[in-house]
Image (cartoon, rainbow, N blue to C red):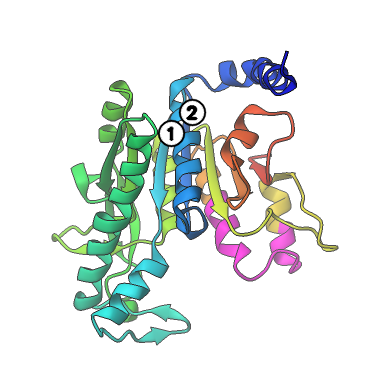
Amino acid sequence: MNRDWIATARTLSQALPYMQRYAGATVVIKLGGHAMGSDQAMKNFANDVVLMRQVGVNPVIIHGGGPMINEMLQRLNIKSNFIDGKRVTDHATMEVVEMVLSGVVNKKIVQAINVAGGRAVGLSGKDANLMICEQTDQDLGLVGTPKQMDPSILRTLFDQSMIPVIAPLGAGHKGETYNVNGDTAAGAIAGALKADRLLLLTDVSGVKNDIGEVVTDLTASQIRKMTLDGTISGGMIPKTETALDAIASGVRAVVIIDGRASNACLLELFTDHGAGSIIRPR
């Protein structure tokens, strides 16, 4: 008998307890540019998400799209201003952001999941009042912070075995459209759903200690300590802050994963090994 078939059967058998563990669980996934950088990466991600849904997991995808936004702004010759490295989102920029995120990027992910055999539905935080925001900083323009969440539309989709794919845009109290940081949006949605897991797919292997080794299991208090002493710094700080906020909102655990690795989500959920750094309340 072919050894590859035997190995596949053994792998499936070993995954059974984890599949049973996550049956009916809600898993929110923040998808960044790494998994959207090639057709093959997108296909692999879509296959993983469809498999998760097939074994009873309720996956929710929140995506970014910064590189695609930058490309479109350049094509349209719309110049951006920056304050401390953060883009000022004026009305002209906001129109492009919404067009790219809710249009091009969102539908590309939806199509990939549907081609893989799933039933994906594209949304933004504006739909069904999923994410009501307030302006984060007047100087930054139409950038929002989620303040009121109504995830009922997502539960309705779960009941129909559908996979929500969400662009990180929010509505204001007076009908404004706000651009929301993708990690922030994912954390807010995971918290509103009291998700079992929030998976933050990144371009790094996880949270590292002071000698550069990935720490696979962390508590919220350890994260705070590592941030205070400078072990966690730079671009990892917003990721861990999102994790702490999500945990405080009722998410059972957050995992910071290297999204460049093949089948990263499946490794985390359905194997002993896991992937990246898991952060738990205590």
Label at residue 59: 1
Could you say where residue 58 lies in the image, as x and y percent from the top left? 42, 28
Q: Helix, strand, or loop for circle 2?
A: helix
Residue 187 part of the magenta-drawn span: no
Could you say where residue 97 lies in the image, as x and y percent from the top left? 28, 67
Disc tally is 2
Q: Residues within 10 Å of mark 2 (few under 14, many from 20)?
A: many
The C terminus lies in which quarter of the figure?
top right
Label at residue 11: none
The span from disc 1 to disc 2 (Cα, nearest Å) is 7 Å
**In this orientation, which residue lies closer to the viewer: 154 or 264?**
264
Mark 2 and mark 1 in contact (Cβ < 8 Å)?
Answer: yes
Q: Helix, strand, or loop for circle 1?
A: strand
Provide the residue span drawn in magenta: 225-243
Residue sitting at x 57%, y 56%: 202
Residue wearing tag 2: 52
Q: Residues within 10 Å of mark 1 (few under 14, many from 20)?
A: many
The N terminus lies in which quarter of the figure?
top right
- The nearer-to-camera label among 1 and 2 is 2
Q: Residue furthest left?
A: 175
User: Is 11 placed left or right of 212 in the picture?
Assistant: left
Q: Amino acid at mark 1?
A: Pro
Main secondary structure type of the part rendered in magenta: helix
Could you say where residue 159 lies in the image, as x and y percent from the top left? 30, 21
Q: Residue furthest right?
A: 211
User: Is 88 placed left or right of 15 in the picture?
Assistant: left
